Amino acid sequence: MNKGICEKIITICDEKIEKKGKNVGLSFYAFFSNYNEDPELLMEVATWWISTQKLNHFEKAVKIKELIEKEL
């Protein structure tokens, strides 16, 4: 995934963890304000989430952040 979306994912994970604690779960839709905002990027993130990482629909934000940091 491109560096821009990786940085956005980390920022959103940090925000959610700060607001709701370390057990907060997210889906890949959490990183998009609108599903039609950037359909190609949404599909890239969905592919990474579902096919590459084999994640469940909701995963802990701390886990997502850790996986993304490895990507960078």
Image (cartoon, rainbow, N blue to C red):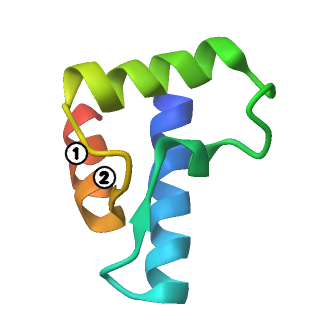
Q: Which mark, by number, is residue 37? A: none
Residue 15 visible in the displayed image: yes
Numbered disc 2: secondary structure: helix
Q: Residue at label 1?
A: 67
Q: Is residue 60 left or right of residue 53?
A: right
Q: Is residue 56 left or right of residue 42?
A: left
Q: Quadrant of residue 5?
A: top right
Residue type, mark 2 in image: Ile
Q: Quadrant of residue 24?
A: bottom left
Residue type, mark 1 in image: Leu
At 46% from the left edge and 27% from the top edge, which residue is drawn? 45
At 53% from the left edge and 59% from the top edge, which residue is drawn? 11
Q: Position of residue 9 (x, y in %)?
A: 49, 48
Q: Position of residue 8 (x, y in %)?
A: 56, 46
- Distance Cα–Cα, label 2 vs label 1: 5 Å
Q: Callout 2: 10 Å neighbours few (<14), some, many (20+)? A: many
Q: Is residue 50 left or right of residue 41?
A: left
Can you name the residue that lies furthest to the top here?
40
Position of residue 63 relative to residue 42, above or below, is below
Q: Is residue 28 left or right of residue 54?
A: right
Q: Position of residue 29 (x, y in %)?
A: 58, 43
Numbered disc 1: secondary structure: helix
Tell me how many marks there are. 2
Q: Position of residue 47 (x, y in %)?
A: 38, 19
At 33% from the left edge and 32% from the top edge, which residue is drawn? 49
Q: Which mark, by number, is residue 64? A: 2
